[in-house]
Image (cartoon, grey):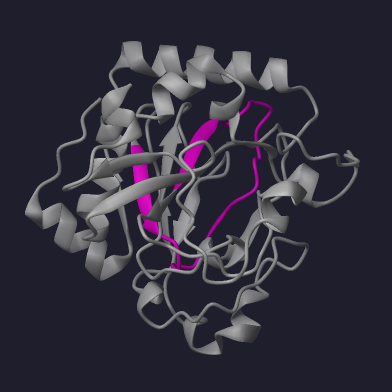
């Protein structure tokens, strides 16, 4: 895994709100990640979020956007070995310019053949904490093209974003009702070979095209939370039991739920693994 970045790449990320890193994984590592993801998806079955009872409507628009499975690291040892890695936390912290990073969640986001587009949205407003330094990792496990649903970014929108958001629904341009000033920004496609990755700020506007092919587009993603973040009142991935124990303003520092992957001065769970 190539987790070294230059100052030029850090500066690009902070200005534009995203960065594509080529050859993040070696070909052998790509095969390892693919096998781990395929195994985890098979074992998880139809349960999108662990310990959450949901009725999966196969015909719902959202479920035709991608196959989504959340926090696979919590019930699959192979995924845990890949995701709970101090190198990922250090890279995310370096790009964001913070002292430490916790794992908020991982997500498999797999566009099935002929999948719907992913509407323009922001990541962090969905989560149970609010930070302008939130950051997401997106690892391509298949070649990602304009035909099969690559990501698109609206550069620098993280600078003017509030925590208002649009849902991922039928109208992919709903975000522009909230931020009309963004409608004239030219979208940048993030084309990637398998093994490349991108990082993007939790407040940058992004989406993905439809999958206009009969093949699958596999991606593994992670949301990273700056150490010291506090609960904002939203449930997101938290269980009812976890939610009942929290009040707004509480530190989110449970290593069982959100392991500390890296910190400049503190020992991390990942470095002890």
Q: Quadrant of the C terminus?
A: top left
Please, which residue is most extreme toward the left here? 7
In this view, 32 is above or below 162: above
Q: Is residue 37 above or below residue 181?
A: above
Relative placement, left or right, of 136 versus 196 is right
The quadrant of the rendering that contains the N terminus is: top left
Looking at the picture, how far across and down is residue 158, in whole percent? 39, 73
Along the line of sight, which residue is nearer the eye, 131 or 241? Answer: 241
Picture residue at 21% right of the left edge, 29% below the top: 2
Q: Is residue 6 above or below residue 178?
A: above
- Residue 257 coordinates in the image, percent (x, y): 54, 40
Q: Quadrant of residue 58?
A: top right
The correct choice, above or below, for 29 with respect to 64 in the image is above
Percent position of residue 172, x then y: 68, 66
Residue 210 in the image, given as x and y percentages of width and height: 65, 47
**Residue located at (66% from left, 56% from top):** 245
Which range is magenta?
A: 197-223
Going by the picture, which residue comes out furthest to the front? 245
- In the rendered image, residue 201 lying in the magenta stretch gets the answer yes
Q: Is residue 210 left or right of residue 200?
A: right
- Asked if the stretch drawn in magenta spans residue 140, the answer is no
Viewer-proximal residue among 68 and 106? 106
Between 136 and 254, the residue placed more toward the observer is 254
What residue do we see at 29% from left, 37% from top?
Answer: 268
Residue 239 makes an appearance in the image: no
Q: How many marks?
A: 0
Instruction: Give the image quarter of residue 46.
Output: top right
């Amino acid at each position: 895994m190539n987790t070294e970045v230059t100052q030029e790449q850090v500066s690009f990320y902070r200005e534009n709100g995203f960065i594509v890193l080529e050859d993040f994984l070696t070909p052998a590592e790509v095969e390892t990640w693919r096998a781990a993801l395929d195994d985890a998806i098979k074992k998880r079955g139809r349960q999108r979020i662990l310990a959450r009872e949901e009725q999966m409507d196969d015909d719902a628009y959202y479920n035709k956007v991608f196959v989504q499975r959340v926090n696979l690291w919590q019930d699959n040892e192979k995924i845990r070995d890949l995701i709970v890695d101090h190198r990922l936390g250090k890279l995310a912290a370096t790009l964001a310019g913070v002292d430490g990073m916790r794992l908020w969640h991982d997500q498999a986001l797999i566009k099935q053949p002929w999948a719907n587009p992913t509407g323009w949205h922001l990541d962090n407003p969905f989560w149970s904490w609010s930070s302008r330094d939130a950051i997401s990792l997106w690892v391509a496990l298949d070649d990602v093209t304009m035909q099969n649903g690559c990501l698109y970014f609206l550069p620098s929108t993280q600078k003017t974003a509030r925590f208002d958001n649009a849902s991922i629904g039928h109208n992919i341009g709903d975000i522009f009702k909230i931020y009309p000033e963004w409608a004239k920004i030219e979208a940048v496609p993030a084309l990637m070979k398998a093994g490349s990755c991108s990082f993007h700020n939790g407040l940058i506007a992004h989406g993905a095209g439809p999958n206009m092919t009969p093949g699958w587009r596999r991606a593994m993603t992670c949301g990273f939370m700056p150490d010291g973040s506090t609960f904002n009142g939203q449930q997101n991935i938290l269980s009812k039991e976890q939610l009942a124990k929290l009040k707004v303003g509480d530190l989110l520092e449970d290593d069982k739920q959100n392991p500390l992957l890296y910190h400049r001065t503190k020992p991390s769970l990942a470095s002890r693994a």
